[in-house]
Amino acid sequence: MARPSRQRNAPSTATALQQGLVVSSHGRHSVIECPDGSRRIVHPRGKKNQAVVGDRIAWAAQPEGQGDDGTIERVEERRNLFYRQDEMRTKAFAANIDQVLVWLAAEPEFSHKLLARALIAAEAAHIPPLIVLNKSDLGELHARGWERLAPYRAMGYPVLGLSLADAEHHPNDAALQALRQALHGKATLVLGPSGTGKSTLINWLLPGANVQTGEISQALNSGKHTTTSTHWYWIDRDSQTAVIDSPGFQEFGLHHVQPTDLASYMPDLRQHVAQCKFYNCTHLHEPGCGVLAQVGAPLAEGGVHPLRHKFYAELFAERVADERY
Ligand SMILES: Nc1nc2c(ncn2[C@@H]2O[C@H](COP(=O)(O)OP(=O)(O)OP(=O)(O)O)[C@@H](O)[C@H]2O)c(=O)[nH]1
Ligand SMILES: [Zn+2]
């Protein structure tokens, strides 16, 4: 029996709202996990889908006869949101996460700039980062990458070196165990360049992960395997530990970070700011600047690596230039 058409867009006050966790997102559609573990597709009432992976949402079932998809009625308040932003748009990675794992490898060689930008975005969102350098089986190349990470270790970020090659045959490997330990009980967003082993990581943590996303994502992507969307994977039976993978990126805009806040999101600079003579010091040229005084000093003694200060100055200039327009 046909229903009156006005019901189509009527708010669903009659239907009790249900809770769901957004586990993947595909443009206008999101896949949610319900408290009973079942999954279903939901979409917003309006054009734009505000929900991102990791969001808790309240959703309503469609009136009978109007399909299985639910509608997103409310996105619950977020604990945090990890995102990047350029002039054009904001690109959210995930909400409500406990840490950001920047996943790098001996090869391809990582970019300091992208790493530094991702770390600043994490600091700005108050989400603790950790760094992994994969492919330690590549010897010399790995040693070089490890050396390039020295400033990040010195500024206090946890950095793990490991190899996922043949990982399933080395369950007692100390570094792999340390990684599992770091992930335990948390929701971790994994972020990193292409070719570093992120898919290998998910498959090691969760053999058969592709199967788990199976049916619904195939329906939404017309069967082609996609790495262009973000997925939330529970890696334990109790749904306490999750990893979230995300598509790679070439740019990491920080339009949401004020130039004068930058130093407070860079731990190596931050530790010296209190020594600056002027309260509004930009740490670029001022006399009596606590940061400039440490540029080139040994890292072990709290020194600021010259490349880090150069990066800071460039990013500062970039952000100031953005604000002029
Ligand atoms: N030598 C070595 N190779 C590895 C290791 N981990 C992964 N690989 C290889 O690196 C290549 C890239 O791994 P993927 O897991 O596809 O990398 P990804 O980060 O998911 O890359 P995209 O899918 O392009 O985003 C594959 O050939 C893996 O077999 C490792 O620890 N050592
Ligand atoms: Zn200063």
Image (cartoon, grey):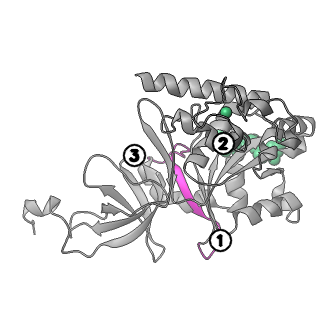
Residue 192, disc? 2
Residue 236, disc? 1
Mark 3 surroundings within 10 Å by alpha-carbon count, few (fewer than 14), some (14 through 19), many (20 or more): few
Three-letter code for the amino acid on which mark 1 is drawn: Asp
User: Which residues, given as a range, are shown in magenta?
Assistant: 222-239
Three-letter code for the amino acid on which mark 3 is drawn: Gly
- Asked if the stretch drawn in magenta spans residue 188, the answer is no
In the image, taking residue 176 as reference, residue 211 lies left or right, namely left
The residue carrying mark 1 has its beta carbon less than 8 Å from ligand 1: no
Which residue is depicted at the point 24% across and 66% down?
Answer: 62
- Asked if the stretch drawn in magenta spans residue 230, the answer is yes
Which residue is depicted at the point 44% across and 47% down?
Answer: 222
Residue 27, disc? 3
Instruction: Confirm or deny contact between disc 1 and disc 2 (CB under 8 A).
Output: no
Give whichever of 160, 222 is nearer the camera: 160
Where is residue 234 shown, x and y percent of the image? 60, 66
Where is residue 276 shown, x and y percent of the image? 68, 36
Q: CA distance from mark 3 to mark 1?
A: 28 Å
Give whichever of 151, 57 is nearer the camera: 151
